[in-house]
Image (cartoon, rainbow, N blue to C red):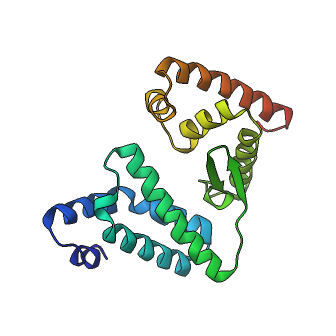
């Protein structure tokens, strides 16, 4: 499949960049697509559309790793949602401050574990915006305190303190709702 997309690109720099993206984020694209669509055939279509869009816009994709990952995940999510709309299934969305997460993106295999993750996401959604953004960046996007600080325009120490406070508040929320 990679050779098909490489044939769409003009020069070796674009081909090397696409190969890197394909190898680095291919499994993420697949997981997002399958997680939203819950159907292998539709997920394959979404992955194909995502990779085609990436190949056509290869020069506009951010090169800084955290932005690159977010961009690739967003493109994958949008193409999967387009496929979902075609099949008229509606995912549940949970608003997370400046972020939005489809419940179909919950990163787990086991149904019980998935429900627990969804309950955690709902608890995060009930938190104050300051902590909500930090916890989403930390636990959903797997950002370090320094990366969180950079994204939110705060100091690393502030990110660390708010992350610890937010985690404590989240723990209390989870305990009050009977989630361990």
Percent of width and height locating residue 95 = 70, 50
Percent of width and height locating residue 119 = 76, 46
| Figure quadrant of the N terminus | bottom left
As rendered, which of 25 and 94 lies closer to the eye?
94
Q: Is residue 160 left or right of residue 103?
A: left
Residue shown at 44%/27% (left/top)?
146
Percent of width and height locating residue 151 = 47, 35
Residue shown at 28%/73% (left/top)?
2
Residue shown at 84%/37% (left/top)?
178
Percent of width and height locating residue 180 = 76, 36
Q: Is residue 134 left or right of residue 173?
A: left
As rendered, which of 21 and 98 lies closer to the eye?
98
Q: Is residue 19 above or below residue 130?
A: below
Q: Quadrant of residue 17?
A: bottom left
The residue positioned farthest toward the left in the image shown? 12
Q: Is residue 158 above or below residue 143?
A: above
Residue shown at 65%/61% (left/top)?
104
Count all numbered tags in the image, as a single digit: 0
Q: Is residue 50 left or right of residue 56?
A: right
Q: Is residue 90 above or below residue 66?
A: below
């Amino acid at each position: 499949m990679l050779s098909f997309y490489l044939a769409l690109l003009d020069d070796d720099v674009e081909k090397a960049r696409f190969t890197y993206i394909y190898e680095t984020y291919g499994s993420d694209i697949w997981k997002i697509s399958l997680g939203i669509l819950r159907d292998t055939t539709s997920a394959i279509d979404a992955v194909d559309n995502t990779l085609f869009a990436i190949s056509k816009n290869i020069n506009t994709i951010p090169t800084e790793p955290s932005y690159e990952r977010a961009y690739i995940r967003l493109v994958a999510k949008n193409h999967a949602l387009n496929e979902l709309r075609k099949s008229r299934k509606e995912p549940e969305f949970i608003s997370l401050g400046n972020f939005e997460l489809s419940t179909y993106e919950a990163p787990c295999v086991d149904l019980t574990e998935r429900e627990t993750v969804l309950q955690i996401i709902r608890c995060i959604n009930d938190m104050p915006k300051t902590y909500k953004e930090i916890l989403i960046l930390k636990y959903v996007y797997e950002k370090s305190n320094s990366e969180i600080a950079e994204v939110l325009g705060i100091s690393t120490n502030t990110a660390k303190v708010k992350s610890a406070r937010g985690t404590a508040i989240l723990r209390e929320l989870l305990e009050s709702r009977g989630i361990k």
